[in-house]
């Protein structure tokens, strides 16, 4: 699972997007947000820990780009571990690629 936490550029509220990667590509699995407006969902499924939550299963393809600015205070986690927290303008590219068995066994994929 990939979790992207950030501050919404317009609404200035906390957002969490949860993605899943598998051999067929990337999927948007959950969205957590604290405010409405400026492109944020209005159809909530439930509330948890002060967040509105929506579970989804939306295919996003094999790649996804996020543009972060310092104002976003973004933090990217993989399986619960922070792997990147950009502090300057950053284009973050997520790609799903096929790996040969040897790469997987060596932990390089």
Image (cartoon, rainbow, N blue to C red):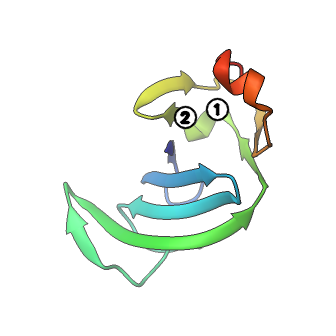
Residue 109 visible at all: no
Q: Which residue is drawn at 65% across and 21% down?
A: 105
Left or right placement of residue 54 versus residue 59 in this view? left
Above or below for 14 versus 10:
above
Q: Residue at x 20, y 61 (%)?
A: 48
Q: Of 103 and 55, which appears nearest the observer? A: 103
Left or right placement of residue 22 versus residue 93 in this view? left
Disc 2/disc 1 C-alpha distance (Å): 14 Å
Q: In which quarter of the image is residue 34?
A: bottom left
Residue 106 visible at all: yes
Q: Quadrant of residue 69?
A: top right
Q: Which residue lies furthest to the top in this view?
A: 106
Q: Quick one: label 1, few (<14), some, or many (20+) residues within 10 Å?
A: some
Q: Mark 1 points at which residue?
A: 70
Give the number of the disc on residue 76. Answer: 2
Q: Considering the numbered disc 2 on the image, is that residue within a helix, a strand or a loop?
A: strand
Above or below for 98 versus 60:
above
- The image shows residue 43 at horizontal and vertical percentages of 40, 84
Above or below for 74 versus 86:
below
Give the number of the disc on residue 21. Answer: none
Q: Of 81 and 91, which appears nearest the observer? A: 81
Q: Considering the numbered disc 1 on the image, is that residue within a helix, a strand or a loop?
A: helix
Q: Earlier in the sequence, mark 2 or mark 1?
A: 1
Q: Which residue is drawn at 34% across and 79% down?
A: 44
Q: Of 89 and 52, which appears nearest the observer? A: 52
């Amino acid at each position: 699972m990939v979790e992207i936490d950030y501050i919404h550029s317009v609404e200035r509220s906390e957002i969490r997007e949860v993605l899943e990667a598998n051999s067929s590509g990337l999927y948007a699995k959950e969205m957590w947000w604290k405010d409405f407006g400026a492109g944020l969902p209005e159809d909530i499924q439930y509330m948890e820990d002060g967040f509105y939550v929506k579970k989804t299963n939306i295919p996003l393809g094999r790649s996804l780009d996020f543009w972060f600015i310092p104002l976003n205070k973004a933090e990217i986690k993989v399986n619960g571990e922070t792997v990147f927290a950009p502090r300057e303008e950053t284009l973050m590219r997520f790609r799903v690629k096929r790996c040969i068995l040897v790469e997987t066994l060596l932990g390089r994929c």
